[in-house]
Each structure stands twice: as structure tokens, then as C-alpha cells.
Amino acid sequence: MKVVVEISKILLAVRPGLAERAELDLPEGSTVADALAAAGLAQGLWGIVLVGDRVTNVSAKLAPGDKVTALPPVSGG
Amino acid sequence: MKLDLDRCTGCKLCQLVCSVVNFGENNPKKAGIRVISRLFTDARYDVVVCDQCAVCIDACPVGAISMEDGVVRIDPDTCTNCGVCVETCPNGALFSHPDVDYPIKCIACGECARLCPRGVLDALAEVGKVAS
Amino acid sequence: MREMHGYAGTILRINLSTRAVSREPLTEDLAADYMGGRGFGVHFVYREVLAGTDPLGPGNKLVVAAGPFSGVFLPSGAKTSISAKSPATGLYGDSNIGGHLAGELKYAGYDAIVIEGKAPQLSYLFIEDDRVEVRPCENLRGMGAIKAEKVLKDELGDEFQIATIGPAGENMVVFASVNHDIGRQAGRCGMGAVMGSKNLKAIAVRGTGGVPVADMGALRKVADEMFSALAANPALKVWQDQGLAQVTTWSNSIGALPTRNFRQNFYENAEALSGERMRSDIHVRDKACFACPMATGKYCRARHRGETVFVEGPEYETTALIGSNCALQSIEEVAFANYMCDELGLDTISGGSAVAFTMECFERGVITEEDTGGIEARFGSLDAFVEIVKLIAARQGIGEPLSRGVRAAAEAWGGGSQDFAIQVKGLEWSGYESRGAPSMMLAYMTCDIGAHHNRAWSITHDIAVGRNVIQGKAAKVIELQHVRPLFDCLGVCRLQWVELGLPLEYYARLYPAVTGRKDSWDDLLLKSERIWNLVRAFAVRERPDFGRADDQPPRRFYTEPVPDGPLAGSRITREDLDTLLDEYYDLRGWDRGGRPTAATLERLGLGDVASELRAMGRIS
């Protein structure tokens, strides 16, 4: 299934070299975490993650056409 | 007019933008709206703003206050800043400021409602729509 | 007097000993070079608090300063910096506070207050526009910081913005906080103790003036874009719901959550302290600083042994240092402990750390029940927490050494406890255990006020480029040490940028619109670097032996590997720390002893400082 992963600008500043927007072809049943890993984001580098405009848990299963947006972890105020 | 006070966080952006739009100043005391903290007693905030009830129109001794398109307005040229309307207002929604020679009140411009991050003032935007 | 855009234009100076009140025009040079807030604090403390001054004596000066963005139409121009020579470190210290004080100070007509001397009796500072009075307030003696705020609000009115200290500040506990708006604290570096040393219980301000800006049209345009971008950000809702409490779960998942006095960095019970649990179990209302859409303040209710209290918080730092670090069991327990610290007027970071240190000393037998006066000071006990912080605030029993910070308590108690007194320069370590994050470790070692995270937070940098990588980490730390404190100079909160990703370009556009000055963002960063070096110069002037040895973490971090959790077994070595420091000093233009060179100071426009330090033989 095809999904889109978008990485916020402030996260790109931390992890340069990643694509701001990646179109991925993942196996059925893939989770949000799988998509983030496939886009090159290690665990610990994302904070809030959205599917569409809803906040999600990274263990949630994706559906074809979903758009995943990764925001940075809270950076301590 | 029903404000969604349960959502107010006390940030006072409404007061600030009111002064910016209506007086061209960064000065939240020069505003037609007030946020009052009731945290110590009731764990909530209050917002005080004119609901256009028009009680002040009859109270004004010099006829400086009138209703235009659903919005109560004070004519600064006629107003003597006697303070009767401020005392009469059932909502306490007319505000005196030392540098302004007439009471300040909401003119339903809708800017505070547009910027309120929590939608507390949506009902005010409705007054604005009626007015325009 | 000519209007100075972005500023009230006046520095208010008050000598509490003589009750003399004077007003000095804010000079163009001071505004241009130091901007405001922390910059003004560093300027006045360096120039006026000479070497050897007792931090708790009348010679110390307390600087309360807003910045050019404070009180202006933009997101969260809400930050007040409070600066002085710190009684915790004996060096320059500052701490900032959100809420509604910064704008109010400028509306009253002042960019900063410089407070000198010592009042003959307990007093508060009353400021209403031109009216400035030092008023006696013996009735507030011993009163909790929040209660005192309520008493003054009831007397003066809700429009007064009030900063208070609690009993800990009156008793000069070196990590006493300054409290404002019920639950906002300038917690770090003991600014509350400096107020207490001056017999100053509170500052109350109300102003009716405005803040002039250079180009209102441009300002409105940028601010409107910023507010719109924040409103459209889908993450805003999470912030409005949980605020900074959301970070606890993440911090635990990556092995950074201080646990049992930083022995561990993973807390098995972290779920019970999560932002979700805060929201579902104890949350009452969202509470914002001035003109801020994020509303990270979470007003909560907590019950303990029949007592019900309300408290703003617990946010992440409090949850980390009081919660996992003392192994408390629930977010409600943390909230109750948070309330105790706020009311007593203690920093929750240093306070939580002091209690955790005590608990470890007790469990290891360094101190006994005889020392604690019968308190069973074990990890996980809220009752013990409450009793210990009361003793600290009163400076009784074990509270006396603890009231001088964990470094001093470890010196008093010995028994190897120096190794696990978790501090740098005398300031207790805030909420990120960093054995698995070398750049963050370096950030804590080199933070100018002691072990605080807010100058540079770089854990994601470690995760991104490798958690074992040492080489090349210093540049990121230095970059952050200039950009993040810049927000404290401008008097604006940085969360909208650093957490919600509002681009820095907005702030670069705001500066000329507000101040009329032409500086680029890079120009501002250079000023921030100057301020950073001036803080270092203060330390070098203060102590002939100041330098590299002051930039070391506690021994625990380079001798004990992480015992469990996701980073089990990982460690950082003494050699790693030396590599980090060498690289850092070289990039900063400091010598390997950690002292700025004369050439570096001269490059930053601090030639007179270079001359002074060279004449003293402190730098070459």
C-alpha cells in the first residue's frame, strides 16, 4: 500500500538529509512506526505523530493513502 | 450572548489585540474587553465585554451613546466622561482609561474573536456579523 | 524624552536600604548591545556586582527585566528574566518566569528594575505607573508564596501582576524560587533567596501605558501570520491538552528520565506519571501565559491525607525531579509535592533533587533516622518528601545542609555522597539524564548558570548522529547556547519555535518591526555570544581557580554504567568528557582551562573586560 510520510521542518533541522516528503510503498498491515522507520527516522526522533490531522499512536496500523506527519519530541522548554 | 468561558485560559490576547486594532497601541488596559482571573476562588477565568444590552443609552445624561446596526457606540465628541454609564453598566463592560477621555467599550470589530486560540469569543463574532 | 521603540525607555533603580527610587533613561547602547531580559541582567550584574560580593548580602543586586518583545502584539511576549549573583553557585545566575509580569512592567513604564540594598523590615515593592513605593508587609512573614500572592491581589486588585517568595526565600534557601501567577516560577539559581536576603517579600506591578513599536503595520502582519500558523498546527491541541507533561513518556522511552537520584534513566512506573494521566486524573483547567495560544499551564487538583490542594503543574521538569527521581507513585502524588514546593517557595528541580539525594543517602546509610529526626527517607515516600521539604524551607535538622544545595550537603555528610550529588557549579541537574547523550552531557557541563537544560537541549542531535559519538558534538551545543538564550533577551517564550516549529524567520522579522533596528538574526546571535562570554568573564573575575574543573559532571555519570532500561550498560568515560570539553573550548575561542582568551573577548566587543581580566592575571 502507498502512504506518504511528511517530516516537519524543525525535525529536518535535527536530522538533515531526510526528504521532507516521502512516498512509500509498504506491506499491508504496516504500522505508523514502520512508516517512520522506512522514511529514515530512528525511534526517539519523533514526538507527536499524526495520521491525517489526528494525533496517533505509532503502533496504529496504516490504511492505503494515509499521510503520516512526524513532529519533533518536546525539547525541554 | 453566551461566551464559552470554560475554554478561556486567561491569556489576554483579546485585550491586547483590541488595543492594537482600535488604538494602534500595545496596551491591554486600553481595550473594550477584560479577562479576570477567578483561579484563586473558582479555578476559572471570566471575560467581561459589552453584550450590547443598551442600558447605558438611557443612562447617559448628554445623549452621547446610541445604537448603530446592533452595536452600542459612544460619540467621543459629545461624551463628557462623567462616568455614569460606567457605573450603570450591568456587566461592568465600559472601561475608563487615564489617557482616553471617554469610556472604552466593545464595538464588535470581531478581531479578538478571530484570534482567540480557544474559540471563547465566537458569540462576539456573531455580533460583529450582525453589525456589518 | 525620545520614544525608544520596543522599550518603555526607563530603568527603575530602587535602593531598599535608603528607600531611594531613581529612574535612569535606557540608553541606546544598552538596548542595542544587550537587547533586554537576560542581556540586561548580565550587563548590570557584571558591571555592578563586583568580585567577592556576598550573594546574600546587601551588595548583591537583583535585576528584574523584560525584553523588547514583552507585552507586544505577538505570540507569548511573556518572559521576565530575574538575575543576580547566585547564592547556589557564587557565580552569575538567572531564571525566567512566564505569566503576565513582563508586559505589565513595561506598561508601567520600565524595562527593568535594579534592586539594591536591604530593607530594614519585610517589605514589598509597589509599582503603579509613576507611583513607586517600598511598603512594609510584616503581615506576610512566613506566608506561602501562593497565599501571599492572593492576599496582595485581594488588597490591590486582579490587574496587579505579583511576584512573591515563600518561607524558603525568606530563610534564604539557596534554591528558593520566585513565584508569580499562582504557578509560574523563576525557580533556578536561588533568585528567591536573593529577594529574601533583601527583606523583599513581593513585587506588585500595574501599568496603564503602551509599548511603542517602530512599524505597527509590519508587526501586525508578522504577528498575524504567526498566530495563524500556530492555530493551523495540528499539534497545538496536544500542547493545549498536556503541555510539557507530554514529554515524560518520550524521555523514559529513550532512557533520559532521571530516576532514583539519577542512578537510573528509566522509570518502571512512568506510565503513572504521564501527561495522559495528568489530563485524565487531576486536570482542572488550562492556563496560559500572556498572549499565548499554547496554554501549557495545567491547573490541577491533588489530595493527600485529607488535604485538597490546587496547583499549576506538574509539568515535565517537576515530574522528572520530584516524580521518577524520588520514585513517587502517581501523578497526583507529584502534584501534591509540586504544591508543597510552590507554596514553600522552593525550586521543584533543585528541591526534587535535594530530596532524592537525601533518600539515596538514607538508603545507603550515609545518614540515619537519627539524622533525619525519625523520617523514614526512602524512595517512593510522599510523606518523607513533604517532611524533608518543610525542613529545608525552615532550615532545620537535615534541612540546614540541604538548604545550601546538594553539593554543600554532600560536603557535610561525606560517606562518598559527593559522587552522587547531581549538580554542576552548585546548581542541581534538571530533567535529562545524559549518560547516553554526549552533547546533552556537554550542554549541562557548560551551561553558564550550572546544570540546566534550557540553554542547549540537544538530545535529538545525539539520537540523530549517534548516541556513542563524541567527536563533533560541541558545535551543536554552542549553536543552541546562542539561539535559545536569545529568546530570554527578547522577552519572548521560545516554545512556539522550538516545540511547534514556528520558523525563526518570523522572529528575525519581528525584531526590526518592533525596535526599528536593522540587525539581522546573525547579528542578534553575535550579541547572544557576547552575553554568553560576559557570564563566563564574571566567573573568571570572581574566582582565580575558576575553569575546567567547574565544567565537570558528578562522578556517578562517568563511573557507573546505566543499570537498566533501554540504555542498560551504556556509559561515558572521563576521556570522552575531556574530548567534549577540548572541542568546546577550542570552538569558543577559550583556552583549554576554560577561560576566554583576550582575543575572543575583543572580537566580541568586550575589550574593556579583556583588559580588566588581564590586569588581574586571570586570562592571557
Image (cartoon, coloured by chain):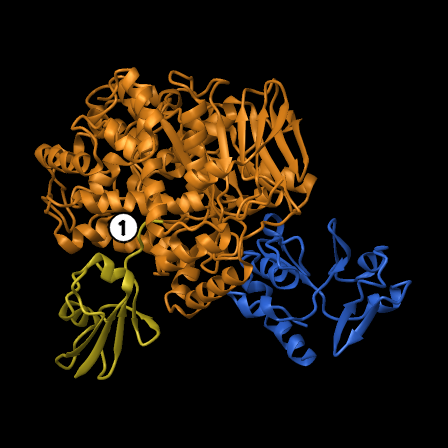
Please give the chain letter of the residue carrying mark 1: C
The answer to whether A62 is drawn above or below residue B15 in the figure is below
B104 to the left or right of C80: right
Say which quarter of the image contains residue C582.
Answer: top left
Q: Position of residue C579 (x, y in %)?
A: 11, 36
Q: How many labels, in total?
A: 1
**Quadrant position of residue C84:** top left
| Element type where label 1 sits in the image | loop
Q: Nearer the viewer, residue C278 or A6?
A: A6
- Asked if residue B21 lies left or right of residue B57, the reply is left
Q: Which chain is orange?
A: C
Residue C477 is situated, as x and y percent measured from the top left of the image, at 23, 44
What is the quadrant of the N terminus of chain C in the image? Answer: top right
Nearest to the observer: residue C263 or residue C28: C28
Specify the quadrant that holds the C terminus of chain C.
top left
Q: Say which chain is yellow.
A: A
Q: Which chain is blue?
A: B
The residue under label 1 is C269
- Between B132 and C137, the one lying in front of the other is B132
Examine the rendering and report whether any part of residue A71 can be seen: no
Q: Amino acid at mark 1?
A: Asn
Q: Give left or right: position of C393 versus C432.
A: right
For residue C129, what is the image quadrant?
A: top right
Q: Is residue A8 visible?
A: yes
Q: Residue at x 31, y 44 (%)?
A: C482
Could you tell me which residue is drawn at 50 percent across and 35 percent down? C64
Q: Nearer the viewer, residue B127 or C283?
A: B127
In the rendering, at what x and y percent does residue C93 appear? 39, 31
Residue C242: horizontal and vertical position, in percent? 40, 58
Mark 1 Cα-neighbour bin, 10 Å: few <14, some 14–19, many ≥20: some
